[in-house]
């Protein structure tokens, strides 16, 4: 056994693993270890060797998606950060902007992350760069030394440096970094001119401070991961998924950890896109239903949509990322009755510890998984491939005591209600990534991922009037599989303020050449010799006087690059906002993206079963809209033959997920061994 590729994605409840080599594909789910995520990775390697005979020495690629950066922020377990700002601007991280997300709250809460660097750890230096990048006041060395000394006396682990207009001229920020390296080499440093070289001081300061906040923890974690691989005799280098949807070598990722916030969800979208391409579908909506959340994204014409920023725990993080919308709705989401007698689900989750009541691990709150078990959707002896036995009695007790009794519901009515509420939340999330962005969800194929995606997919499709659902061969571990489908990718950006009417193609080309050199230097560290590196360019644009930016592709090969850029911007603005004005537009930022595609892997497998062999049992199942339980066929996903059609009502089981097929739906195997569910149209 040689040439193996391993993808491992760490989620809130389970760590998903896929191992691909030749015609063999092995998958597994192991419980996540929140205290030390690398322990779950080590457990996965041990199980691969013990259960599938996969020697560590045969692993040639090792790709990893991690939530370490995100968890550090959510749990407030990052570094002790100090902030250095231009004189007069030390409090910008606490002042923020005048807009508030919660306009009508009677109890106001801070909406800026002042906790990243409290007042005692925010210092100033005397210097000034102009809005054109000129040095108005040279950096005062005495104030710099005093500022660094004060932060070191405060015991900081990391220092964020965000000076006014440093994105146009970083000379002062770099001098401060050199001084810190000389007097305190153990302290991590993040420069705004490198983390986020763009205008808007508040957003640039926030993302720089967050980079510093997570850098020591991410650095330790990835260092430990690399050590674990070496100790396990894994020869492969460690590759990490970035939020944008490309892989980076661990040593590069450690330098820019703020780009890892949506590492896992980005991989799931790439996996869904790869499965859709194999089945012949380009327009997809992916929904990854895990234990604690659901991640929703849209793929248009085979291209994953990106956005220029994201929110992490409610704070703006201006980093290019796959456009994923996350909801606090998953299998572990807790159902509860509110004070007004309404049924609510989430956003709190039972997680992996103690987990849903049916885990019999001490959890007493009813969850979506408990409702699924009560309704007959899950086999208590075959959850996660039989690695975890579920207790239906505990699930029913939790729902009866916490939901049915307080709301005067029957047990089944309460369980169906839990599903109805959580499905409505997920459907609203899908509308956010489709209708709100100018797309008609009915023109897309729904791709459910995660351990819970198959259970909710057809209900969501019916709610959104979607006729086709594509269930990947291994949906429960598709985020891990997406890691193996991802390219190596690096991106560099810079501020470039110019109205389109006054812009010069030659000047823009010169700026992009400089970005090319930076991206090429990163790609050289990836050892991509022998791979073709594709380059493309983009511009962040807006109408003159407008503050919301849209990324538009920049084609230097066009007859008139600037005219093409403006026309594409107008088209994008009309699709997203419903109108285009024809008004003058401006370029705000430029971006160069270098991408090296890796050899494709067949992680879907092929359907080689004989027809008529998939039926393995019957079970009483409760479906929404039916007055009583229905005797339902239970099929083994691995035994469904190519071309064979399964008609609902049915349940299709496999190690990593369960697919619910209500009456009126059919399922058949298509290319890539994916399962295409289709809804019968009313005549």
Image (cartoon, rainbow, N blue to C red):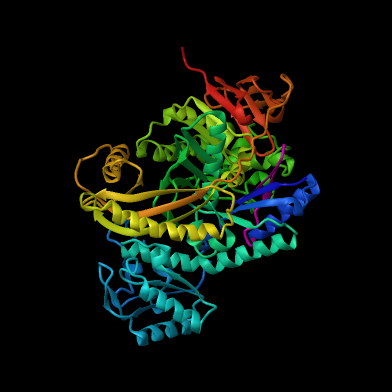
In the figure, residue 610 lies in which quadrant? top right
On-image quarter of the N terminus: top right
Residue 614 lies in the magenta-colored region = no
In the figure, residue 622 lies in which quadrant? top right
User: Residue 510 at x, y = what percent?
Assistant: 34, 57
Query: In this view of the protein, can residue 70 be seen by the observer?
Result: no
Position of 101 relative to 570 (above/below) = below
Position of 506 relative to 276 (above/below) = below
Position of 172 relative to 11 (above/below) = below
Q: Which residue lies at the image location 66% right of the left edge and 59% below the top edge?
A: 38
Q: Which residue lies at the image location 39% right of the left edge and 49% below the top edge?
A: 537
User: Residue 661 at x, y = what percent?
Assistant: 59, 26
Observer-nearest residue: 146 or 665?
146
User: Residue 186 at x, y = what percent?
Assistant: 55, 78
Apparent side of residue 647 relative to residue 202 in the rendered image (left or right): right
In the figure, residue 168 lies in which quadrant? bottom left
Start-end of magenta stretch: 17-36
Observer-nearest residue: 366 or 294?
294
Q: Main secondary structure of the magenta part?
A: strand
Q: Which residue lies at the image location 47% right of the left edge and 65% below the top edge?
A: 211
């Amino acid at each position: 056994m040689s040439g193996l590729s391993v993808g491992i994605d760490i989620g809130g409840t389970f760590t998903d693993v896929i191992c691909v080599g030749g015609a063999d594909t092995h998958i597994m789910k192991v419980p996540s270890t929140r205290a030390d995520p690398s322990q779950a990775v080590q457990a996965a390697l041990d199980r691969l060797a013990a259960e599938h005979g996969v020697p560590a020495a045969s692993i040639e690629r090792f790709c990893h998606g991690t939530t370490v950066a995100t968890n550090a922020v959510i749990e407030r377990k990052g570094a002790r950060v100090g902030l250095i700002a231009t004189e007069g601007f030390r409090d910008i991280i606490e002042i923020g902007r005048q807009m508030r997300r919660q306009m009508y709250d009677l109890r106001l809460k801070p909406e800026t992350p002042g906790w990243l660097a409290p007042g005692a750890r925010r210092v100033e230096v005397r210097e000034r760069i102009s809005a054109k990048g000129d040095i108005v006041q040279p950096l005062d060395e005495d104030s710099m030394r005093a500022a660094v000394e004060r932060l070191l006396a405060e015991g900081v682990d990391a220092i964020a440096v965000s000076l006014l207009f440093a994105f146009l001229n970083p000379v002062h920020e770099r001098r401060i970094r050199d001084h810190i390296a000389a007097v305190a080499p153990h302290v991590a440093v993040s420069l705004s001119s490198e983390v986020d070289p763009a205008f808007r001081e508040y957003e640039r300061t926030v993302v720089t401070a967050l980079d510093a906040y997570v850098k020591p923890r991410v650095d330790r974690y990835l260092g430990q991961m690399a050590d674990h691989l070496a100790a396990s005799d894994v020869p492969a280098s460690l590759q990490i998924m970035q939020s944008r949807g490309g892989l980076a070598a661990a040593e590069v990722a450690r330098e820019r950890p703020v780009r890892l916030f949506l590492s896992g969800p980005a991989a799931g979208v790439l996996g869904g896109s790869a499965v859709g391409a194999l089945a012949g579908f380009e327009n997809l909506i992916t929904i990854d239903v895990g234990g604690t959340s659901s991640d929703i994204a849209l793929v248009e014409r085979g291209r994953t949509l990106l956005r220029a920023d994201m929110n992490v725990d409610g704070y703006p993080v201006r980093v290019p990322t796959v456009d994923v919308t996350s909801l606090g709705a998953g299998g572990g989401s807790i159902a509860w009755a509110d004070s007004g007698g309404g049924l609510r689900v989430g956003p709190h989750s039972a997680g992996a510890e103690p987990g849903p009541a049916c885990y019999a691990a001490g959890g007493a709150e009813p969850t979506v998984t408990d409702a699924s078990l009560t309704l007959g959707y899950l086999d208590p002896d075959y959850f996660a491939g039989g690695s975890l036995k579920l207790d239906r009695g505990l699930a029913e007790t939790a729902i009866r005591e916490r939901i049915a009794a307080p709301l005067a519901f029957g047990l089944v009515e309460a369980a169906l209600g839990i599903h109805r509420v959580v499905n409505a939340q997920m459907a609203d999330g899908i509308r956010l990534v489709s209708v709100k962005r100018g797309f008609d969800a009915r023109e897309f194929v729904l791709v459910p991922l995660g351990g819970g995606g198959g259970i909710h997919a057809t209900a969501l499709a019916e709610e959104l009037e979607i006729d086709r659902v594509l269930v990947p061969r291994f949906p429960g571990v598709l985020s891990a599989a997406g890691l193996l489908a991802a390219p190596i990718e690096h991106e560099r950006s810079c501020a470039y303020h110019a109205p389109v009417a006054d812009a010069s193609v030659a000047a823009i080309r010169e700026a992009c050449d400089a970005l090319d050199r930076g991206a090429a230097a990163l790609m050289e560290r990836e050892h991509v010799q022998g791979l073709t590196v594709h380059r493309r360019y983009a511009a962040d644009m807006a109408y003159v006087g407008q503050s919301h930016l849209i990324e538009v592709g920049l084609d230097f090969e066009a007859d008139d690059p600037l005219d093409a850029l403006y026309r594409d911007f107008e088209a994008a603005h009309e699709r997203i906002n419903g109108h285009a004005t024809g008004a003058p537009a401006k370029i705000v930022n430029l971006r160069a993206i270098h991408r090296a595609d890796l050899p494709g892997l067949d992680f879907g497998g092929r359907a080689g079963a004989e027809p008529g062999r998939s039926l393995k049992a019957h079970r009483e199942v409760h479906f929404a809209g039916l007055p009583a339980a229905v005797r339902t066929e239970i099929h083994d996903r691995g035994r469904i033959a190519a071309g064979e059609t399964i008609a609902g009502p049915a349940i299709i089981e496999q190690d990593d997920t369960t697919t619910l097929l209500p009456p009126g739906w059919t399922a058949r195997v298509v290319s890539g061994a994916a399962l295409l569910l289709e809804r019968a149209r009313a005549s």
